[in-house]
Image (tube, grey):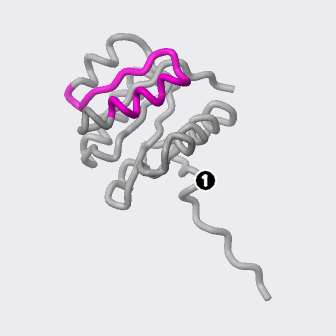
Amino acid sequence: MRNFSTVICVGQEIRLLDVRSQVLRTRFATVLYGGPADLYRLLAQHPFDLLVLCHTLSEEESHEAAARFLACNPGGAILAMYTHHTTFSLKEADASVPALAGPQRMFHAVDGLQQHGMPRFALSPYLQAAPPPHPR
């Protein structure tokens, strides 16, 4: 079982990141946030257990943030927040949650990562294809 205590959130909308970080602070000791340009500085502060990729990142920013995070935190996990416009960030994610799903769904995904882990690049249960229908 993994035990996350340090979380970093990266995105373009600082107000949204601030709110998301406040929610995450109810469960985690250290939560930092910033834009893509802040990532090097934030990652240099200390190791992180979890990267939250905000749906406001571009495809390039998402890939770069994930690569930087994993280079500094090889055992870290990545949670992608997505909308129908930002599914590209799922390639880097260990789990993913719709950006508008609310805090409980985000915590559910994080709990799953902590309890069971997920192989790198696996889609979250919310995005996996539905099982085929039973033959009649």
Q: Residue furthest top?
A: 45
**Residue 18 part of the magenta-drawn span:** yes
Q: Amino acid at mark 1?
A: Pro
Q: Is residue 96 left or right of residue 32?
A: right
Along the viewing direction, whichever of 34 and 92 lies nearer the viewer: 34
Write the start and end of the magenta stretch as one range.
Answer: 17-37
Mark 1 Cα-neighbour bin, 10 Å: few <14, some 14–19, many ≥20: few
**Residue 111 part of the magenta-drawn span:** no
Quadrant of residue 131 in the image?
bottom right
Q: Looking at the figure, which quarter contains the N terminus? A: top right
Residue located 57% across and 36% down the image? 110
Quadrant of residue 66 in the image?
top left
Instruction: Locate residue 3, reporting x and y percent.
Output: 62, 22
Up-down: is 64 above or below 134? above
Q: Report which residue position mark 1 lands on.
A: 125
Instruction: Locate residue 123, reporting x and y percent.
Output: 54, 51
Q: Residue furthest left?
A: 37
Residue located 28% across and 45% down the image? 56
Residue located 54% across and 18% down the image? 5
Q: Is residue 37 left or right of residue 26?
A: left
Q: Looking at the figure, which quarter contains the C terminus? A: bottom right
Up-down: is 105 above or below 117? below
State the count of labels.
Answer: 1
